[in-house]
Image: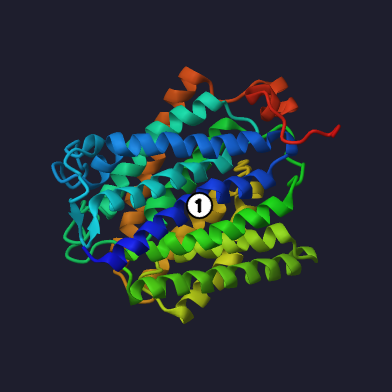
Amino acid sequence: MVGADTAWIIVATALVLFMTLPGLALFYGGLVRSRNVLSVFMHCYAIACLMSILWMAFGYSIAFGTGGSGYWGGFGKAFLSGVTADSVFLTLPEVLFFAFQMTFAIITPALIAGAYVERVNFAFVLSFSALWMLFCYAPVVHWVWGGGFLADGGIFGETGVKDFAGGIVVHETAGLAALIIAFFLGPRRNKSTPPHNPGYVMIGAAMLWVGWFGFNGGSQLAADGGAAMAVTVTHISAAAGSLTWAFWEKIKYGRASLVGLVTGTIAGLASITPASGFVGPIEALIIGSIAGILCQEAVTLVRNILQIDDTLDVFAVHGVGGIFGTIIIAAFGEAIWAAQIGSLLIVGVFTCIVTTVLVKLVGAITGLRVDLESETNGLDLSVHGERAYDMNS
């Protein structure tokens, strides 16, 4: 084991958890009405706790077990069987690699939460997230990162799909799942209310930006020049995406908003994620610059053309960003077109099928949506019995 690698991945693990708690919670929480902000915090926090236990129990083994096949890692490492303080993965303690990957398993279903806020049944959130992580996310991790059939030596030959930190594994899967849930859930009864606290949105986005250095830089799994480059290109793409989103917003609507600026940050970050281990600063500038406009147009497509109420634009920002970033790796000559496009299609179809089955199954058991009164009064008080703000104090 190399001490510097271990130290860096410990930091990166903390940074990726920081993306969900509190980064994503604040980013999403600021975008909803004030009567629903605590429910968003509850979703993010509860998902983080539940995914941690399930990743230890079964998820890690499904994704990175060695006793299965190219499609399924098996249960040989269930409950971390055989994983001790002395077990090694590359140059890292295996238990640290487990913990780093656990933070990815936390944030991926948490990203989906942005599609269903303000109207979803809390029991559905927990049940769906648990099953989706185990039966959709973890198998895809195995296919791409765990030596499965999409990786090097798989169905695309010696050079498999290139997805450095999760354009397919995290952003495509979460984005498509979000779109499907939003479709079945139906629109909010009041979609006209603006974000209740743009300050929360900015603070959350800033935390996500910082945490993303661990997300992408940590995916190098070493403290070396590759990690440093991944951090650098991540930052450049985020900055470029922020500016082009705001610029495009100014052209279209005559003003650039704070919420738009920081949403562009997330678009730039999502788009650079799969490419961050394969490109340099100039390519990152191009990726982020395109992402700020492309993802903004995707928001318009989903809202106005498809008429789907993906509340916080999970598919348009994360899904489209991750797909775009995966494709552009091939455009820059750093991957094979067939592997990139083919893997996107395979994972996309699989995600859509699994998500649809789980939405129908879990929804039939727990109920998908809260009643009209609960939605009108807000989920904070009606579901959780708390208020975020005391208007009388």
Judge the density around disc 1: few (<14), some (14-19), many (≥20) Cα neighbours within 10 Å: many
Q: Where residue 145 sits in the image (x, y, percent)?
A: 27, 55
Residue that mark 1 sits on? 18
What residue lies at 45% left-to-right and 58% top-to-bottom?
Answer: 322
What residue lies at 43% left-to-right and 61% top-to-bottom?
Answer: 214
Which residue appears farthest toward the bottom when viewing the image?
282
Q: Where residue 32 sits in the image (x, y, percent)?
A: 69, 42
Which residue appears farthest toward the top when viewing the image?
365
326 relative position to 381: left or right: left
Name the amino acid type tagged 1.
Answer: Phe
233 relative position to 190: left or right: left
Quadrant location of the N terminus? Answer: bottom left
Q: Where residue 159 sits in the image (x, y, percent)?
A: 22, 66
The quarter of the displayed image where residue 332 is located: bottom left
- Residue 326 is at least partly visible in this image: no
Quadrant location of the C terminus? Answer: top right
